[in-house]
Structures are given as structure tokens and as C-alpha cells.
Image (cartoon, helix red, strand yellow):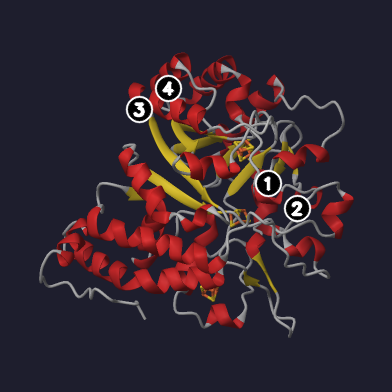
Amino acid sequence: MNTKLKQIHLMIKPIGPQCNLNCEYCYYLEKKDLFPDGENFIMPNSVLSACITKYLSGMSTTNVEFIWQGGEPTLLGLDFYKQVIELQMPFAKQKVITNSIQTNGTLLDDKWCEFLVQNNFLVGLSLDGPKAVHDRYRKDHNGQPTFDRVMRGLKLLQKYGVEYNVMATVARETAHSPNEIYRFFKEQGVQFLQFTPVVERTADSHTEQLGLKLAGPLSLCEEEGNTTVTQWSVEPEVYGNFLITIFDQWVRNDVGSTYVMNFDWALNSWIGNPSPVCQFSQTCGQTIMLEHNGDTYACDHNMYPEYKKGNIADIDHTEIIENMINKGFHIKDTNLPDSCLKCKVLKACWCGCPKHRFIKNQDGKPALNYLCKGYKRYFLYIRKYLHAMSQLLENGLPASHIMLAFKGPIAINVSKNNNGV
Ligand code: SF4
Ligand code: SF4
Ligand code: SF4
């Protein structure tokens, strides 16, 4: 069948789980052990060509997005991405093709930045905050800090006017520094940023057999229900407080000038649009993750043999997508615990990422999200503000007018000590 399908993102790992860094909380580097010894992890030309042509010819939408990710995708060098542009070129008249690249930024130089800006790449830069925060978990293979190298990359992106956003992870210890982190990003002139919580369980018997140190989703090893998280996983309530602390500053000072994606996603859900991110959507499965060898999965958090859906060399993309939809490839199911179904913020949260749903009830009901306490506190806290912002938008006013409510009495109902409930 060759039905053309919409709204699917392609996330490509052209260098697999290879990286020049060795961040303590990285969930992907250990996936090397799932490949044969001696694997070089470089995407062959045949796979690259198949992925670009099949994806572009299989999508019915005008806008088609490629997301290049790793490991560290810049390890492949510029020539690889020049080839990408050449392969995309024959489709450029019918399609609006965009490329994003998610990088730790340490290998960027002038030539890279010239290429990125000329070809309109959007760069997602992994930077966790100021030096002490960033270097707490992000080290290289010699245990050396990486902040200075990442900052050099950030300055180059800014110098060349490359479009970028900062992707900051929030881990156990760094979650205690929201003010410091947010202030730092603003001082550095970062306008677009997002925060991602680090949550990983230690290996269960299933992933241990695969030689891994971390667990997969609960569904892979249902009987164990192991809830032990790694020592770098963020604590739920601390994560909720982290977001609230930054939101408090943002809503008073920075709406319309600093774009914190987490708040945009929440506002989006509040006004009734589908969430643009998988973890807060009702279902997920709108991404195809392609490993360097052409193997295809729903998501890189679920890159385990059980979830492999085929290889790009053998299967048409649309076939893979139909498999996803028809055979439960959409790993985020709608079987939620009662506490979620009754929750006041269900439509903003949807029980988060299924990989984080491992807090089991005694009665055998579906598992609750590990971050629930943090999510609930955060979403309840911000909802009165979101309500006010959506009212502004409905009345044709910019959401940034909410900041006026903190400067004097205006007709927006936002109390200072609001707890949102
Ligand atoms: S930079 Fe990214 S891919 Fe590399 S080790 Fe760190 S988290 Fe993993
Ligand atoms: S499993 Fe989690 S990270 Fe993967 S697509 Fe679903 S919500 Fe997103
Ligand atoms: S906040 Fe908690 S109870 Fe509410 S939807 Fe999210 S995970 Fe479920």
C-alpha cells in the first residue's frame, strides 16, 4: 500500500550512538552494545539515499522536516551534509524541506556555521547552563569538562546568525539552580530554549541480558516494575519547582522576548491545539527514528530489538508508518491510570512520556508517570496565567500583555499569590 501520510517527522542518526562526549546521563551511548562488534556506525550512502528519496516521495505534505541527531551528528563532517543537500535538491521545487541538527556544538567551526546558515539549518544546541551546572554531568571521554567548547560553538552560531535553540537537560543536582540557569541563558542572548527532564531507571533483567545499564519502557519487562532511578535522574517535585521558578520570572519579564518551549507547549494545549511535543500529546508515534544502518524505530528512547519495525532498504516508509499505526507502534497508549483520567491538568500532560510511566499501583492498574508530582504542581500553578494569556489572544492582544498585570491594576485576573487551583 502506498497511501501518502501526513505529519510524520524523520529523526535520523547517521553516526548511531557515537559521540565525542560522554555525558554521565546519556541514555544513547550504551546502545552501541546492541550492534555487532567492529561496527563503524557510519551511515552508508545507500541508506542515506534511500531515506531521503523514500521520505520525500512518501510524504504528501508540502513541508518536510529532517532531524539529524546522534550521538554527535557533526562527527560525520561537512561533506556528509553537503551530500544530504544534493540528494534533497531534486525535490526542492515541490517541497519545502527543512533540516535540523541537534549537536553538542563542540566541533562547530567557521566552515560549519557558513554551511548551516547557507542551507537554513536549525541547530539544537545541548547546553545545560553556566559552567558549574553544565560541567556537572557533561564531560568528555577523558572526564574533562566541556562547557568552554560548547560556548565557543554557541558564540560561532551567534556570530554567523545561524538559527538555533538551546536544549537544556535538567538532572538531579542541576535542577536546584533554576534562577542561575535562566539568568545565564538570558545573559548569553539565548532567545529560544527548552528544558528536558532526565529520567532513567537502572537496568532490569531484560536490558541486563542485552548488556545495558539502563531499563527500557516498563512494557518490555512488565513483571519487574523496577522503580529505581539512576542517581542523576531528576526528582519529580524538584523538577516541578524548577519549571515554576523559571515560569515566574518569564511571565513577569520575558513573554514575547524569550521563548521557553515548555511554556509555549502548555499554552498551546490550554487553547485547545494538539501539543507540538510527543510527551504531552494524547498519543505519540509521529516520528520515525532511523538508525545509521537503516533500522527503523518509533523513538530513540525505545531503541530496543522488540521495537524495531524494519529496515529502510526493504520497506517503503509509508508501509512502516502504517505498521506504526495499525500494530501499536504508537507506544503512548490511551490506557491511563484513574488518577490521570480524573486529573485537572490531563489535557496538558496526558501522563507524559510512556517511558517514564513506571510508578505502579498495587491494584495492577496502568502505571503512573514518575514525574507526576512535579507535572501536577507545575501545570496547576501556571494554568491561571495560561487562562489570562489565552483571553488576551482571544481578544486580539499579544500574550505579552500579561506582564502588565504585574506592573499595576489592569483587567486581567492574575493574583500574585496564585496557586492556580
Ligand atoms: S553530547 Fe549528547 S549524545 Fe553525546 S554523550 Fe552527551 S548526551 Fe550523549
Ligand atoms: S516514547 Fe516518549 S519520547 Fe518517545 S515518542 Fe513517545 S512520548 Fe516521545
Ligand atoms: S499530572 Fe499526574 S495525574 Fe495528572 S495527567 Fe499528569 S501524570 Fe497524570
The image position of residue 10, as x and y in percent, is 58, 40
Question: Mark 4 — residue?
Answer: 119
Q: Does label 3 or label 1 sit earlier along the sequence?
A: 1
Q: For marks 4 and 2, give the one nearer the viewer.
A: 2
Verify CB contact (< 8 Å) between mark 3 and mark 4: no
- Label 4 sits on a secondary structure element that is loop
The image position of residue 273, as x and y in percent, is 39, 62
Q: Does label 1 or label 4 sit earlier along the sequence?
A: 1
- Label 2 sits on a secondary structure element that is loop
Q: Does label 4 or label 2 sit earlier along the sequence?
A: 4
**Residue 254, labelled with which disc?**
none
- Placement of 324 over or under 372, stated as above or below: above
Question: Mark 1 — residue?
Answer: 27
Give the residue displayed 56% in from the left and 64% down from the top: 352
Verify CB contact (< 8 Å) between mark 1 and mark 2: yes
Would residue 68 appear left or right of 34 to someone viewing this image? left
In space, the residues marked 3 and 4 are separated at their CA atoms by: 16 Å
**Residue 214, labelled with which disc?**
2
Q: Which quarter of the picture shows residue 157?
A: top left
Q: Amino acid at mark 4?
A: Asn
Answer yes or no: disc 1 within 8 Å of ligand 1: yes
Viewer-proximal residue, 346 or 22? Answer: 22
Q: Quadrant of the N terminus?
A: top right
